[in-house]
Structure formats: structure tokens, C-alpha cells
Image (tube, rainbow, N blue to C red):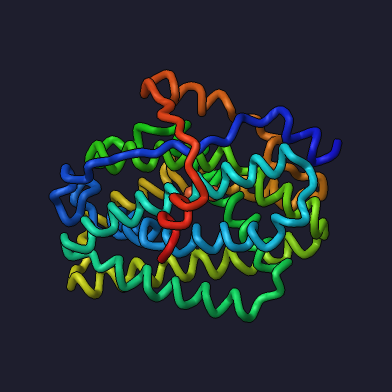
């Protein structure tokens, strides 16, 4: 089966312009007053604006080489969606920063790291790292949409932000992969880059989380540690449930749509009364992603 055939079964990729208030986030440790889970979520949110700009740039490097009009359309949708995610996470990051979780420092640090990587990395590796991160975000998205109850302790706007982001990550999960297959196509490179960046990603998010706690002069309590252990490693826990889908990536015939989880998208649309689909212009997208 070719990449192009696989795309045809995937959902349309249309950016939705959202407007979350975030004024309901009033507590510094906004997840159940748990400093570990809160700083984990804040660290991830901080990485999105610079990270997603990097994803867009790595795909844009190859855009001119894509001749398939369907994939070109998907790239446009991917850029629009990631641009909106970046914009909305910048908005929530302002609120978190004002509450004393200094995520702006992380945004700036990662922005510099990605700029350096961009200058140093082979553009095939830069795209391969996006393909890998898109798989990681897609499996985390699937986990959230299958277990939305784990987000119940969050303020409504933060919960809605994560669920919307999750839906769009699934919608566009194969775009960077298909661009890579069409323009580079080396599976071994994809696997090596994924192995290295998984370690770097876990290390970096852990360091950012520790920095947030240190800057806030916060020592987590035993109760925080127990809650976090359950959140990550409990029966419904995040870490426990994404290992198998993560490993699928290393199969030589893997494609993101081997796992057809469009039902999760439809369920979200029905429950929220969305979509608020808009066709964003490139100019809007540029504005949303300038960091
Ligand atoms: Fe995203
Ligand atoms: Fe994405």
C-alpha cells in the first residue's frame, strides 16, 4: 500500500480557530493542587509554541517537492492547525506565567535550541524528528481522548484546549510522515532519530519541570508524589498506556493510519457541537507561529 492510498481514508485537515478564555485558571497548581502534574502540563505547554513552529519549518523545507495535490492540501491544513495550537498555547502560557509558573523562560530556551538545531541538522533529520514527535503527540492525543476523565481536575478552558489539540493532532498525524516517505523514505533514519529524540524529549521535559518547581520555590509533597505516580503509572496511567503504540513506530511497514482512530474525532465533534472550521490564510498562520 502506498502512502498516497493511505491518505485517502484519513479525515480532512481543517484548522479550527478557537477562542478559549483561560480566565478560569486562577490557581497556580491548577491540576488538583498537585505541583508535579501541574508542572508537567505547564512544561509541555511551554514547549508547544517553539516546538510546533519547528514542525512547520521542517515540513515547509520539503513542500515544493510534493506533487500530489491531496498531500499539498494536507500540508496546508497541518500548518494551519499547528499555527493555531502554537497561538492558543502562547495564550495559556501567559496566564501560567502570571501565576508564577515561569513558562516564558522555557519558551525562550527551547526557541533558541531549535534555532541552533535547525542550523546544524541535516534537513532530513530535522523532518525525521518532526515525524517522531508527531507520533508521540498523536499517541498522547489518543490516550487523552480515550481517557478524558483524567483531565477532570483541570479548569474547563484548559481541559477543552487539550482535547481540541488532541483531536487535531490525530487529524494531521500522518502529514509529516507522508512528506518524509515521499521525499526521504529511509526507515532506518526515522528509527534512529526517534530513539535519540525520545530520550532527549523525556530528559528535557523533566528538566523543564524541575526548573518550574525550582523557580516557584516549591517542594512537592508526598501527596503530590502519590497523585503523580497514579497519574503516570496507574492502571489508566499515561506512561503505561502509550508504550505499545509508541513501539509500533519501529515496525518497518508502520503508517500512522494503520491505527484508524477517527471515531475519537467524531465523538469529540458530536459532544462539543464543533467544528468551528475556518480556512486560515497563510498570513494568519505566520502571525500565529512567529515566536
Ligand atoms: Fe499541535
Ligand atoms: Fe502535530
Q: Residue at x 65, y 40 (%)?
A: 73
Q: Name the quadrant of the C terminus.
A: bottom left
Identified at 79% across, 41% down, the residue is: 3
Q: Which residue is drawn at 55% across and 23% down?
A: 263
Please identify the quadrant where the N terminus is shown.
top right
Indicate the position of residue 244 as horizontal and vertical percent values: 62, 44
Q: In this view, does 167 lie above or below 194?
A: above
Residue 18: percent from left, percent from top: 35, 38
Residue at the right extreme of this rendering: 1
Q: In this view, does 195 lie to the left or right of 67?
A: left
Q: Quadrant of residue 162?
A: top left
Quick check: can you spot residue 50?
Answer: yes
Position of residue 84 in the picture relative to residue 192 (left or right): left
How far across and how far down the image is residue 139, in percent? 55, 44
**Near-viewer residue (231 or 72):** 72
Residue 76 x, y percent position in the rendering: 60, 45
Tell me what residue is drawn at x 29 percent, y 49 percent.
227
Q: Is residue 240 left or right of residue 123?
A: left
Number of marks: 0
Classify residue 148 by image quadrant: top left
Nearer to the camera, 155 or 123: 123
Amino acid at each position: 500500500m502506498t502512502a498516497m492510498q493511505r491518505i485517502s481514508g484519513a479525515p480532512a485537515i481543517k484548522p479550527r480557530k478557537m477562542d478559549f478564555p483561560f480566565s478560569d485558571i486562577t490557581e497556580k497548581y491548577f491540576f488538583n493542587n498537585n505541583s508535579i502534574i501541574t508542572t508537567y502540563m505547564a512544561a509541555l505547554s511551554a514547549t508547544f509554541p517553539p516546538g510546533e513552529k519547528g514542525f512547520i519549518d521542517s515540513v515547509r523545507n520539503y513542500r515544493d517537492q510534493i506533487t500530489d495535490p491531496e498531500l499539498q492540501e494536507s500540508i496546508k491544513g497541518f500548518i494551519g492547525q499547528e499555527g493555531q495550537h502554537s497561538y492558543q498555547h502562547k495564550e495559556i502560557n501567559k496566564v501560567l506565567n502570571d501565576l508564577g509558573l515561569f513558562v516564558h523562560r522555557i519558551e525562550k530556551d527551547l526557541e533558541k535550541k531549535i534555532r541552533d538545531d535547525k542550523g546544524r541538522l541535516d534537513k532530513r533529520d530535522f523532518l525525521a524528528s518532526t515525524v517522531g514527535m508527531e507520533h508521540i503527540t498523536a499517541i498522547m492525543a489518543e490516550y487523552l481522548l480515550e481517557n478524558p476523565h483524567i483531565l477532570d481536575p483541570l479548569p474547563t478552558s484548559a481541559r477543552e484546549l487539550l482535547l481540541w489539540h488532541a483531536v487535531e493532532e490525530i487529524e494531521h498525524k500522518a502529514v509529516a510522515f507522508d512528506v518524509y516517505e515521499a521525499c526521504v523514505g529511509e526507515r532506518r533514519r526515522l528509527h534512529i532519530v526517534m530513539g535519540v529524540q525520545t530520550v532527549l524529549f523525556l530528559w528535557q521535559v523533566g528538566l523543564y519541570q524541575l526548573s518550574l518547581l525550582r523557580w516557584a520555590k516549591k517542594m512537592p509533597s508526598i501527596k503530590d508524589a502519590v497523585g503523580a505516580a497514579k497519574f503516570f503509572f496507574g492502571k489508566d496511567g499515561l506512561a503505561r498506556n502509550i508504550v505499545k503504540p509508541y513501539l509500533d513506530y519501529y515496525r518497518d511497514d508502520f503508517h500512522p493510519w494503520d491505527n484508524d482512530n477517527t471515531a475519537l474525532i467524531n465523538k469529540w465533534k458530536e459532544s462539543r457541537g464543533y467544528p468551528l472550521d475556518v480556512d486560515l490564510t497563510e498570513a494568519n498562520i505566520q502571525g500565529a507561529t512567529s515566536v
